[in-house]
Amino acid sequence: MSRTSWDGIFVEHPVRPVPVGDPLSSLVASIPQPENEILRPVGPRIGYASFWEKVPERTWSGSAWNLREGLRRMSDTVDIGVEFSTVVRNALKIAHARYSRDRGRLTTPWCYSGVTDAFIDRALRRGFREKSQERAIDAVLQVEFLASIMPVPFYSYADCSWDSLFATVARPEMYADLMSLSPSSMMRRRDRQLGMYERAAGIIAMSHWFARSLVEQSGISPHKIHVVHPGFSAGRTILEPRPVRDKPAPRRRLLFVGRQHTPYAFYRKGGDLAVAALSVLRREYDSQITLTIVGIDDSEWPLQSPVPDGVNLLGVLPPGQVARLYDEHDLFVMPSRQESFGIVFTEALSRGLPCVARNVYAMPEIITPGVSGALVDGDDVDQLAKAIVTVLEDDNIYRQCAIRAPQIAAYFSWDRTARDIAGIIGREV
């Protein structure tokens, strides 16, 4: 499907970014001690609830797995999550297969069905009972979009909600089409989520932006909401930390990273804008500038026009290889039209790589213009190209990113995230 078929689908989100400024100016105090100096606190026993993918380590782009491991190091945490056998997964996929006009193929939104919800609820209750026989579980932490009601105080950790997602497009029905769901099914899931919020002991938001969305769009009391930024995966446990190398001028190597499953996903991440900006840059700034795109290969190119000169497609890569690409490139560019948090930006900054992103959602909580990169407004390709040039030519930004990289890596770690979440639950239970 051509890029133009997605033009105009996204609208300016009504929930504006929270002007928190430089994330390190007030958050460095939250950086934990080195891992071998962390003492396991005495606190409540936490049941960890996730709907695990077929490869559990990939669940929620690795966030669910890494958070669980961090919590196990910080507290008495037991897994009560849900794993479906291959037989059950395949049966649900076949039962819910449907043709998507937007994607031009069969899709199966089985993860969002009422039958799947019932399976998950039953499995969570069973896991809770089994683990409680060993020692009582004091609280449950549910991650991503799980919305089950638990028999003890329970918390939700997520980066967005159905209400926040509806507002990314002109009408909720449009988002239902993108998700291959019927509007009624999607609204049922939204109501189920609101019911969970009402009963939950607390909602832990990945960003200040999402916390604001919970208050303004879902009517949640701010007293129930906590903000805990997530950690990241690429490179932290795959590669040993090393000094950030110098990135001297001329700087010409741009990088774009995103899991691309459909043309819509490429458009949502602003991939079309990055490609268009590259053409402007090669024509008006430097004919040798290049753009490496991770997440799609030659067979999956989503735009109608051929792959332009200067674009290098690498397909899907493991975290360790992505971390090396941060080290080898000069600027990370991803002007996402919809990005609930943007862990990929923290990954880049932790390797000393400046970023150009969009001034919406939680991206301003990560990137500080003039310090760690630049933020752009809207779909203006010329503005994006100008921002890229401004950062590429600013030696001070590169010095600051190199200096700040160890602090960024320490703060955006799953150990710090786990410690903060365990502390919230420990204080309240």
Image (tube, rainbow, N blue to C red):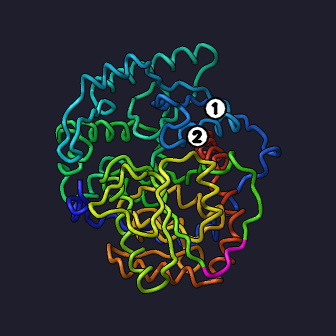
Residue at coordinates 32% horizontally, 48% vertically from top-left? 262
Residue at coordinates 56% horizontally, 51% vertically from top-left? 230
Q: Which mark is drawn over residue 44?
A: 1
Comparing 328 with 56, the one in front is 328
Check disc 1 and give the amino acid type.
Pro
Q: Name the side, left or right, on which 47 lies relative to 105.
A: right
Residue at coordinates 69% horizontally, 69% vertically from top-left? 404
Q: Relative to 142, say whether 354 is above or below.
A: below
Q: Name the side, left or right, on which 246 lies relative to 174.
A: right
Provide the residue span drawn in magenta.
246-250
Residue at coordinates 64% horizontally, 83% vertically from top-left? 395
Comparing 112 with 4, the one in front is 4
Count of residue discs: 2
Q: Position of residue 143 (x, y in %)?
A: 48, 38
Tell me which corner region of the image, top left, top right, bottom left or bottom right, holds residue 62.
Answer: top right
Check disc 2 and give the amino acid type.
Ile
Tell me which corner region of the image, top left, top right, bottom left or bottom right, holds residue 118.
Answer: top left
Q: Position of residue 231 (x, y in %)?
A: 59, 51
Q: Name the side, left or right, on which 120 lies relative to 416.
A: left
User: Which quadrant of the figure contains the C terminus?
Assistant: top right
Q: Main secondary structure of the magenta part?
A: loop
How far is mark 1 from mark 2, CA to CA?
Answer: 8 Å
Q: Relative to 106, say whether 357 is above or below.
A: below
> Element under label 2?
helix
Q: Within 10 angstroms of label 1, few (less than 14), some, or many (20 or more) residues? A: many
**Residue 143 is covered by the magenta coloring:** no
Q: Are marks 1 and 2 in contact (CB under 8 Å)?
A: yes
Q: Position of residue 167 (x, y in %)?
A: 27, 57
Q: Earlier in the sequence, mark 1 or mark 2?
A: 1
> Element under label 1?
loop
Residue position marked by numbered label 2 in the rendering: 425
